Amino acid sequence: MHRLVPKCGLNFKPTPQKPIEYKYGPRSVAIGDFDNDTVLDMVIAHHIVNKIAVFLGKGDGSFRNPIMYSTGSYSSPYMVTVEDFNNDYQLDIAVANFGTNNIGIFHGFGNGSFSSQIEFSTGSSRPIAIIVADVNNDSLLDIATANHGTHSISIFYQQGHGNFSPPITYSTGYDSLPSSLAAGDFNNDNYLDLAVANYGTNNVGILFGNSNSTFEKQITFFTGVGSHPYSIAVGHFNDDGFADIAIANFGIYEIGVLINNGNETFANQVTYSTSSASPYAISVVDFNQDDRLDIVITNNGINNIGVLLGHGNGSFENPIPYSTGSSSSISFAIGDLNKDTRLDIIVVNNDTGSIDILLGQYEGFLNQTRYSAGSSPGSGVVGDFNNDTRLDIVVANYGSNDVSVLLGYKNGSFAKETRYSVGSNPIYIAVSDFNNDTQLDIVVANYGSDDVSVLLGYKNGSFAKETRYSVGKWPTSVALGDFNNDTRLDIVVANQLSNDVSILLGYENGSFANQTRYSIGSWPGSVVVGDFNNDTRLDIVVANDVSNDVSILFGYENGSFAKETRYSVGSYPQSVAVGDFNNDTRLDIVVANQMSNDVSLLLGYENGSFEKETRYSVGSSPISVAVGDFNNDTRLDIVVANSGSNDVSVLLGYENGSFTKQTKYSVGLSPNSVVVGDFNNDTRLDIVVANAASNDVSVLLQNNRGTIAYEMAYASGDGSSLQCVVIGDMNNDTNVDIVLANYGTNNIGILFGYGNGSFENQMILTTDSNSHPTSITIDDFNGDSIVDIAVVNYGTKQVGMMLGYGNETFANQTSGGISFDSRSLAVASGDFNNDKRSEIWMFMYYVIELNLNIPTLSFRLIHDYS
């Protein structure tokens, strides 16, 4: 299949311009770039006025006035197609002239103009359809026609330079009235075969190609009494390696699908109703870019087109209609007319003599589903905690001092939460494999206890009891990375009151060394890691709330860091994320600015410096930001949780690093953390949001149109004050789970994922009385290949560690030797010193601490950065 553009969503809107109108009805349309300006143009066949019309595209979905070319008196051109027949790298036009029994070739000059028609006779055949393919494998394009008058198909073999030999004709049967044909290799012998829709005899004919440029006698497959198949298309519908067939059965209001058995036979036809419409033209294309072919039809009589979305297993959904106004369409062409990476449709309306342009539109996300978590859930992430290939959710419950884990089901729903106690007021959470046991672990920043809790994961999505590590004052955010290149994850924590970050270097067993702290800007609120200067060493970026800037700390090979460099952003930056937004292989930064209600974008240079910010408006009080490719166009997009307006904003990215205006989607009350992941295994990113005031988690799933189908909510518990959410596979079921830091209820909650986008109810891991966990990171801290959890306990000023068992249980929380005097804001982990153990970073108001992970699963402070 020839694909014109990469990725797109699935919704269409008419262009604001009036339809292109004619006194006499157009018959067929084809598209191509005729003037080499990278913008698609179109050609229309007008069977009544005996002409073709060439429209050059403007690049916005509209077209210039047509240039007309005669196809000859009484020619009645029925179908048009485009290809480069003479290998001059310029597109040419071929047309089936029903009235004069010939095919016409118009050679293109590459500037949008064409030569006069060159004719090749088809005898007395009345050609009604035309296709182009290299039928005999000589690298020259040949032409085949379906002949209505002689009940046959003709093949014109090209001799080079756009010249064709006289046709070779094959019968399609008495009174067959062939109306459409398509080419495909149906028996995988590397020779093209032909499929023809025989309107008169109610069947599809297959002519298998031979190595000597001939074809076998037609074999027919019945399509039903009175079916009158009018159009046919070929594609791979079920990934078995054999080409299948889709048929527009005009007479019985159905779409037929013939699945190839692989032995030169086809399974019995499976049909899909088009209600009272007679399907006329048919094509296959991947409209919603899920790597599964869909079917597109024109419906004669009810003035719409229909799209049948493919499941990838040979079956399809029922048609989704898109109106063509008051016109009955008979032909269409598909391509990206306005260069927005979304497929558009040109529709030919024969009865009203008009051409409609339907521009593809990305709809985004629709409704939410909500799941209970702990009290005041404040942060969440996703990951496959139980190894079931399904994403799960973990949320930090600020009010209940625990994290909630919701295990995901295959359909995108989640099991009831399981909670795990962490420190005081958990506010932020992260997940990874800290102990190299292939199981995701959790680390939580505990805002009230000035520590992080680490919960090591088991294969079943449960977690060990937390181990705590002290960090700075009021930890608010945590991130993970291997800072010292020892293949072990380390932790970095942003500490709000002490204005610093803490670094905790990890050991092989999932424990961490004591923190090392680095001073940064005023009131740091969010931290992420990335290699900004392309030296293969991880660096750190921190959003500083009060000083309205971000701090960049470049990393050294031993896990230490250079003095900060600052860049101004918006007012009260709360959250930061990184990604390559302009495809220059350099990391860029996006920051959510709470007081100015916008996000700042800083594009990166090769030396690790950044351009001046560009701002984009979002909702009220944006407090968390994440990135992902939501519309599958290979460009990163942005999602922001707006705590003031109780919604999320999605900004779709362009190739140059700029973004569209926001689209908002409602969630729960006071959303304060957002993460993305594919919860239902449909290859489309979904969104999970921790809602602090409504004590639940919202999951927004994209449906197979590239839009969000609904939101699900999972409760984190009354009074949980959810502060942080991270995702990971906590129970080795290959499904993503959610880990929550519940500040108000002093625990960590885990929601084990089922792999279908749904989760179990929250499982609780206690983080001790008045611990108030605020931030989490997950990793394998003890080298058992099972994910553990580290959590910052704001109330007890310790980092808690919960080692995972891989079976949905965790060891009780231990401190791991990390405590702090100031309020630690956030925690992150990573292997900073290349000792194959994950260290922990602690982020505080004035100091960043790096804590080394020693083999006994305890941590020691190795450096303060102030």
Image: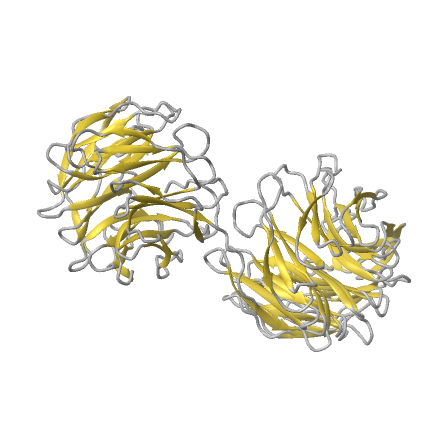
Asked which quadrant contains residue 166, the reply is: top left
Residue at image position (35%, 57%) is: 314
Give the x, y percent position of residue 369.
56, 69
Q: In this view, does 36 lie to the left or right of 784?
A: left
**Viewer-closest of 356 and 517:** 356
Of all residues, the one furthest to the bottom in this rendering is: 718
Q: In this view, does 830 lie to the left or right of 20?
A: right
The colour scheme used to paint the residues is secondary structure
**Viewer-closest of 22 and 827:** 22
Give the x, y percent position of residue 171.
12, 41
* Quadrant assignment for the N terminus: top left
Q: In this view, does 226 lie to the left or right of 275?
A: left
Residue at image position (74%, 62%) is: 428
Of all residues, the one furthest to the left in this rendering is: 174
Q: Visible in this render: residue 841?
A: no
Residue at image position (87%, 59%) is: 497
Q: In this view, does 207 lie above or below 376?
A: above
Q: In this view, does 65 lie above or below 262?
A: above
Disc tally is 0
Q: Is residue 396 left or right of residue 850?
A: left
Asked which quadrant contains residue 106, the reply is: top left
Residue at image position (12%, 37%) is: 125
Give the x, y percent position of residue 799.
81, 64
Q: Visible in this render: residue 213?
A: yes
Give the x, y percent position of residue 204.
20, 50
Q: Is residue 669 above or below residue 588?
A: below
